[in-house]
Image (tube, coloured by chain):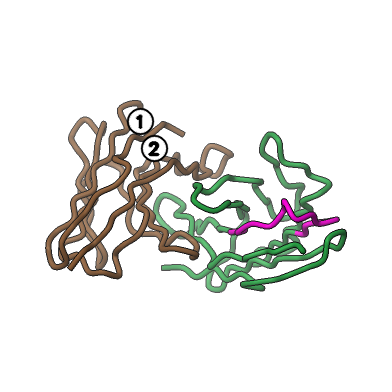
Chain colours: A green, B brown
Amino acid sequence: GAVVSQHPSRVICKSGTSVKIECRSLDFQATTMFWYRQFPKQSLMLMATSNEGSKATYEQGVEKDKFLINHASLTLSTLTVTSAHPEDSSFYICSARDPGQSGNTIYFGEGSWLTVV
Amino acid sequence: DAKTTQPTSMDCAEGRAANLPCNHSTISGNEYVYWYRQIHSQGPQYIIHGLKNNETNEMASLIITEDRKSSTLILPHATLRDTAVYYCIVRASNTGTASKLTFGTGTRLQVTL
């Protein structure tokens, strides 16, 4: 299947700082990528839909000014957690839709663990 | 996306077939059935998807009922590495916002010796 890569896989940052997570589609061009957050023992929660060349669409309750999403190219989307707080500590996962697959199959990255201290 | 109903958990002996059911009685005509699994602390892994016909790949088989209101994911010879949470999701295939994946609670499959 198609490959989606995230970086970094783990990051620790201090409260009040910002941290950026990258999501790349390695073998296909993705006009649409998705960002999820997952807390321990819970399911994945969609945060936003990232569209190449346009503004991201955020789910209800997700602060767009806190979770900045940029999708500047067909293979890269970034999520920046601004002014991080300990409660932002979570597992962040991106996914990308492969338009070349039947049903526009969506593939996921490995996830990024964020710990805010 | 249409809602799906899955059992919370299932056990399967190693080497046996694991049959994971999913109900999606309100599925629309343009919605596919997708299966993903998530092994602890990893991103979800795509397994298989289908629209109407049964599908098979190197990982699993997907059996969709004729009325499309339910489906079964079959892992033919389960191994310990198949222990994971399995998610059944129905989703439109178009490129609009309806094509996003909405995760439920899934089925926690435990494969045992």
The quadrant of the rendering that contains the N terminus of chain A is bottom left
Dot 1 falls on a residue whose secondary structure is loop
**Residue occupied by mark 2:** B31
The stretch of residues the image draws in magenta is: A80-93
Q: Position of residue B11 (x, y in %)?
A: 21, 54
In the rendered image, the residue lying farthest to the top is B26
Picture residue at 82% right of the left edge, 66% below the top: A14
Tally the marks: 2
Q: Are marks 1 and 2 on the same chain?
A: yes
Is residue B54 left or right of A117 when viewed as pictured?
left
Q: Residue B8 appears in which quarter of the rendering?
A: top left
Residue type at numbered disc 1: Ile
Residue A92 vs residue B25: left or right? right
Q: Position of residue B83 (x, y in %)?
A: 31, 62
- Crowding near the residue tagged with mark 2, few <14, some 14–19, many ≥20 C-alpha atoms within 10 Å: many
Query: In the image, residue B98 lies at what x, y percent?
Result: 53, 37
Which residue is the extreme one toward the left? B16
Front-most of A87 and B15?
A87
Q: Which mark is residue B27?
A: 1
Chain letter for the residue marked with disc 2 in the picture = B
Q: Is residue B16 left or right of residue B108?
A: left
Using residue A61 as the reference point, say whether residue B95 is left or right of it.
left
Q: Is residue B90 magenta?
A: no
Res B5 → quadrant: top left
At mark 2, the secondary structure is strand
Residue nearer the viewer, B66 or B15: B15
Going by the numbered disc 2, the residue's amino acid type is: Glu
Q: Nearer the viewer, residue B33 or B76?
A: B76
The answer to the question of whether label 1 and label 2 lie on touching residues, with beta carbons closer than 8 A, is yes
For the point 35% across and 31% down, which residue is it? B29
Above/below status of A7 relative to B71: below
